[in-house]
Image: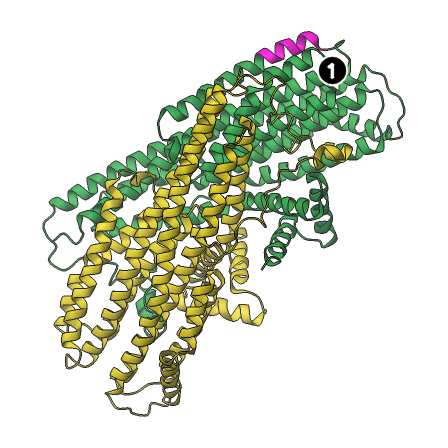
Chain colours: A yellow, B green
Amino acid sequence: MKGYSDATKRFLLAAKHAEKTALQQLSSNCKLVNAVKDVIHQLQRERGISNVFLASRGHRFESQRAEQVELSLKREQALRSQLKSMYLTGTESFSNIRLLSSITLALQGMDHLPTLREKVAKLNLPPLDSTQAYCRLISGLLSVVFEAADVASDPVITRLLVALFNFMQAKEYAGQERAWGAIGFAETHFNRRLCDRLEQLQVAQQHSFGIFREFADAQEQQLWTELEGGPATRDVKQLRNMIQQLADGSPIAEELSEVWYEVATRRIDEMQAIEEHLTERLLEVATQRVQQADADLKNHRRRLQALENQPEPGSSPLTMLFDPAMPGLQGSGALDPNLANGAPSVPDTNGFPQSGTPTANTASGLADAESLSSHRSFYDLLRDQSEHIKRMSNELEEAKRAISEHKAIDRAKLIMMQQWNLTEDAAYRRLQKHAMDQNARISDVAESVIRASSKKPA
Amino acid sequence: MKGYSDATKRFLLAAKHAEKTALQQLSSNCKLVNAVKDVIHQLQRERGISNVFLASRGHRFESQRAEQVELSLKREQALRSQLKSMYLTGTESFSNIRLLSSITLALQGMDHLPTLREKVAKLNLPPLDSTQAYCRLISGLLSVVFEAADVASDPVITRLLVALFNFMQAKEYAGQERAWGAIGFAETHFNRRLCDRLEQLQVAQQHSFGIFREFADAQEQQLWTELEGGPATRDVKQLRNMIQQLADGSPIAEELSEVWYEVATRRIDEMQAIEEHLTERLLEVATQRVQQADADLKNHRRRLQALENQPEPGSSPLTMLFDPAMPGLQGSGALDPNLANGAPSVPDTNGFPQSGTPTANTASGLADAESLSSHRSFYDLLRDQSEHIKRMSNELEEAKRAISEHKAIDRAKLIMMQQWNLTEDAAYRRLQKHAMDQNARISDVAESVIRASSKKPA
């Protein structure tokens, strides 16, 4: 007897193998997210250009529009290739259902882009309807990024995806601000309502950028600080102030439309550099994680082999039955304090990288792998793995806090839309108002809405 | 052009296929949970019998012990077969890492049961150490049930697994109460400490039974009420009272040990009937869910086929680009209220079965399938599926509340053990005390411990 059965060995390896498989899927999802990011960026430009084109009844931005459509098509093709490679592996039925569903919806939108573009080309669509259509498609594509973050199984990658999703969401609010602004300028006047809407989008941007900064690394934060203090943001702020002065409906020169579009675009294009930084880091970490999981799996196999060839230990090896660190009989710890103080299997949460620089993680991964090859028992191997998994789960849960809050707000909105027949906007504003009135976080208000509604139908 | 690309169709089916695959895995996990439940029940009996056998220095329960070991072995073999069938499907690397890890740990414990039994047979182990070893193994097996609940992708099955896990946890506390009681009776005296420990286990039982009742169906609640009002519970309560009178250390007749064991066992055996009811329903629902998912997938395929053979629609079909129910430009809903009030895609949470009787769910599933075969567009199919998935996710999140709370308490305990060098017991008691002092729920106290600790190392 080696102190463990074949089944135990098999499941030990299966857990390690499952970790690798999950990271491979995650890595493929990261590539997908990268392709989605590129499509969104081009669609945001296409939306703005189409808007000016429509509002000016085809007088402005005709050639820019044609060029932009080419750029969008190129990125769409790259995304479609990425999606194709996903289902060519034959593992798509093990993917997450919600991720697949969000992909399907986004694809359907992309399938109809030619129809939308034709209507725009023929000036057969009001600017607002065109903007709406692009917004819906981008919202659908952003959902893919959100779901990819939600199903991620690795804490460092999850933190990166949360940062990226919130950055992209903020950038989309900036894009919508550009679109509403373009409508106002092109129509040569603003009004109170349009100004309120623009302000709302500015607040929403700051909220999402705030979450991004919480999860970003030092370099990304630095890039962000530079952007906020740079000339593009200064110019946008100047025009924002000007618009606020125009809430009374004073007429403005039509040409300002292009200035607004160009200034807002410069700021959004600068945002793209941060997006690129985030996605580059994402792809790098994902690749490293897969490599590390692969090395760990091989090491586990080698270690098991070595244990099998080892002579039988004289004394019986430690097992979970006699390990004082395992939870057992309630109250026995208090009876014999030495029993529980011996070697508590508490995950060293402080030792786990919080900000998650990829190099630091790889280094610690290799150190793990090395120490595993020293002489230790099967149970040590098992317990190390179990603690590694617990530590990852705890870190993962921490990283998913921002995602849960986002989901709670979404659910609360749906409940309120249904109960009081509100629009999504109105529901969100009501949540926001409650939070301000009660000096509470918006996600806590959302949680109380959900709790209250789940109690009603007993 | 049919209004959708091959990729869109492929991902629509992939999402449906992923749902079926997830349910098949879940169904296999449910069978595993059922086998685990049987092993735990026998090990609980074996623990109690071994305890009396050891405490009486081999004078009592010798033959019962031999018979019990045979019963335990039989259930262990059934569990091992179930595990074997899991990895024979070759899909184990798509299983959840934490579930696989918990299985590995439990298997390692079972691998060492022969050593434990040998020590018991030779009276080579103090009763407390034997009890501890069985408790650790049972705790490891309970983790498998917990992880199975945590990874479940179906709201009704999750609710059932939460009910079952909490019932099994409560039954385990009852088993530990029996064990501590047996130690006291066999040693012919109690003390204040032992009495406190017993009371603590009674409180823990009530807490877990409370969660079970929240998630149980009417029949299970009825069974529970009958158990609580029945003779077995009455007898246990009488002996509990008697023990409280003996806290001063008064001597008692050794024979009472067997009476306590038998009375406590009768109550625990009655609990088994409820466990059986829960697992039978679990296996039934799981089977139905897989069948339903299979029928849904076939129906989707048929519907897609029909759409392909249909003549091209004269007008362009609805797409997500022009669907007013899709989220789009922020603020446009307020601008044009008709835009958003048209057909909001709000999941009908009230319409979704909350308590989840399997028949009701199957019926609604079939109704869905039937209405899908009427003439509708591809986008309708897609939107129905997307809403179905959102509804399931929301329900799932609701059902997982109890699991998150359990995890938060576990994490807070680990943090406190590490920070103040406490035993697990002491950490739990401190959480409990804080909750009572602040008149808060223990899970809320746990959340604040986690939040405070994650803020410290900046």
Residue type at the position of mark 1 = Leu
- Indicate the quadrant containing the C terminus of chain B: top left, top right, bottom left or bottom right: bottom right
Nearest to the observer: residue A180 or residue B395: A180
Q: Is residue B220 toward the left or the right of residue B91 in the image?
A: right
- Magenta segment, which residues? B61-70
Disc 1: host chain: B
Q: Residue furthest top?
A: B63
Residue at x 52%, y 24% (from the top left corner): B107
Label 1 neighbourhood size at 10 Å, few (<14), some (14-19), many (20+)?
A: many
In the rendered image, residue B349, in percent from the top left (x then y), is placed at: 43, 51
Residue ID for mark 1: B54
In the rendered image, residue A264, in percent from the top left (x then y), is placed at: 32, 77
Can the viewer see residue B93 in this picture? yes
The image shows a total of numbered marks equal to: 1
In the rendered image, residue A41, in percent from the top left (x then y), is placed at: 28, 65
Secondary structure of residue under mark 1: helix
Nearest to the observer: residue A441 or residue B143: B143
Residue A451 higher or lower than A307, as above or below = below
Give the main secondary structure, helix, strand or loop, of the magenta stretch.
Answer: helix
In the rendered image, residue A267, in percent from the top left (x then y), is placed at: 34, 75
Can the viewer see residue B226 in this picture? no
Q: Quadrant of residue A427?
A: bottom left
Residue at x 40%, y 79% (from the top left corner): A196
Residue B270 higher or lower than A458, as above or below = above
